[in-house]
Image (spheres, rainbow, N blue to C red):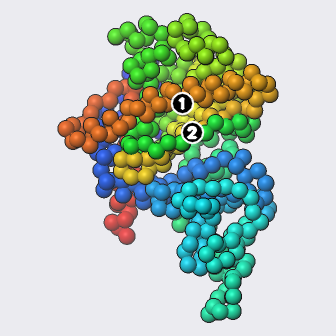
Amino acid sequence: MARWPKPAEGSWTEHYPEIGTGLISFEDSVSPEFYELEREAIFRRAWLNVGRVEQLPRKGSYFTKEVRVARTSVVVVRDGGGGVRAFFNVCRHRGNKLVWDEFPGEETSGFCRQFTCKYHGWRYGLDGALNFVQQEGEFFDLDKEDFGLVPVHCEVWAGFIFVNLAREPEQSLHDFLGPMVTALDGYPFDKMTEWYVFRADNRSNWKIFADAFQEYYHVPALHPQQVPIEVRTPGSGFECAHFQLDGPHRVVSTGGARRWTLPPEYMYPIERATRSGLVGPWESPEIGEPPPGLNPGRIDPWGIDNFQIFPNLEILIYRGWYLLYRYWPTSHNTHHFEAMLCFQPATTVQERVEHEVAAVVFKEFALQDAGMLTGTQTALESGVLDRFPLNDQEVLVRHFHKVVADWVADYQKNHAEV
C-alpha cells in the first residue's frame, strides 16, 4: 500500500481506491460491543509500544506498564545479559500482582536483583526463572522450572520497546512496522533523552483523539494563532504537503518556513522572547544525514513528519527533536493519553529554557485539541447522525477506521471458524 507523492492529477484519497470516498460511520467509537471486540482483535494481536530503552539504563532496571484495554499488566526488565525482556506481571503462586509499590493499579519503575512477591515471598530472577519458594517442602511435587514468570513477546526497534500479548505473534515487529516506518532506522532517537512527559485521562474514545492528529484541516479554525491571516480567510485553502499509507500505518507531512519568519501576532510573546515554541527551538541542533524515511514526500521546505504506527502510537519528528503520543483505551468512551517531548540534553541555560517553553506551548495547543473531544464523543453518542463525509485531507482518518474495522472483521472470522 506504500505510495510516494501524489501525481499532479487526482486526490490523495482517490489514489488509495481500497479505502473508498463515501460517507463513513463512527459507530466504532461509540459502541461498547465494538470496544470489547477491539480488546481481543487489536490490542491482544498488534505490537504495542510500552517504552524506550533509556528507561532501562542498566542490568536490573525495570518498569511496569498497565495495559488496561487487555486487562493485564506487564513488567519490562533489563536482564543479566543486558537484553530486554517482558513478563506478565503475575506471581505464579496465587496470582498476586508481582511488581507494584503502594497502589497495585499504578505503574512503577526501579532497580532490583530479583522480583519478590509481596504476598508469600516467591522470588524470580531477571530472566523470569523461579528462584525461591517459601517453605518449598510443603508443596506437592513442585518443580520450580515449571513455574517461572510467563513471558511476553518483546522486541526493540530504534530503541522503542514493543510487546505483543498474543501467544504467537502473527508477524515479527520488523515485518509489522513495514518499510515506511523502518526507513527511519538510523534517526538519532537515542540522543534525545531530555523528556517532558504529560499524561491525562480523557472522556472520549481513543480513536477520536487519534483522528485529531491525522489531519490539519482543523488548524485554521481551532488553532488560528498558528497560521497567517491569508490561510484563515474563507476559501483560501489549507492542505498538508504529503499523505502516505503503508499497511496499517500512516504518515502526514507538513511543509512551511521556519517559525520565526511569521509576524509577531502569530505566536505568543514568550515564543519570540525565548526563540522557541510550538515547533521547538528555533535553532535546532544538527542530527547529521537524515535517514531515507524522513520527509518521505521530499517536501521543501519541510516542517513535520507525523508517523502513526497502528494501533495507538504516533511519532512526530520535528527539526532536531521528536514528540511521542500514545492512546490507551480504558472503555468505549474513555482513554488514557500520554505525550512525551524528547530533546537532545540542554548544554546551556538558554537551551533548557527553550525546551521548557516548547513543552508549555505544546501543552496549550494539545489542550485546544483535547477540548473538542468530549463534545465530539457526546454528539456521536446521541445517535442523531450515523454517516459522515470526509474530505481529501482526512484520508488518514478514513484509512485508520477502515484498518480498525478490518482487524475486527478478521478476528471475528477466525474466531467463528475456531
Task: Mark 1 or mark 2: name the one nearer the start of the chain.
Answer: 2
x then y, percent, for residue 375: 32, 35
Left or right: 180, with 281 as reference point: left
Figure check: 178 above or below 21: below
Dot 1, how many residues are within 10 Å of its Cα: few (below 14), some (14-19), or many (20+)? Answer: some
x then y, percent, for residue 269: 58, 13
x then y, percent, for residue 123: 70, 74
Q: Are marks 1 and 2 in contact (CB under 8 Å)?
A: yes
Q: Which residue shows up at 50% across the image and 17% down it?
A: 226
Left or right: 323, with 137 as reference point: left
Q: Which residue shows up at 47% across the image and 59% down it?
A: 70
For mark 1, what is the residue? 363
Which of the two residues, 139 or 142, is positioned nearer the viewer here?
139
Helix, strand or loop under label 1:
helix
Q: Could you tell me if residue 362 is visible in this image?
A: yes
- At label 2, which amino acid type do we have? Phe
For mark 2, what is the residue? 198
x then y, percent, for residue 417: 35, 67
Which of the two residues, 161 or 114, is positioned nearer the viewer here?
114
Quarter of the image that includes the C terminus? bottom left
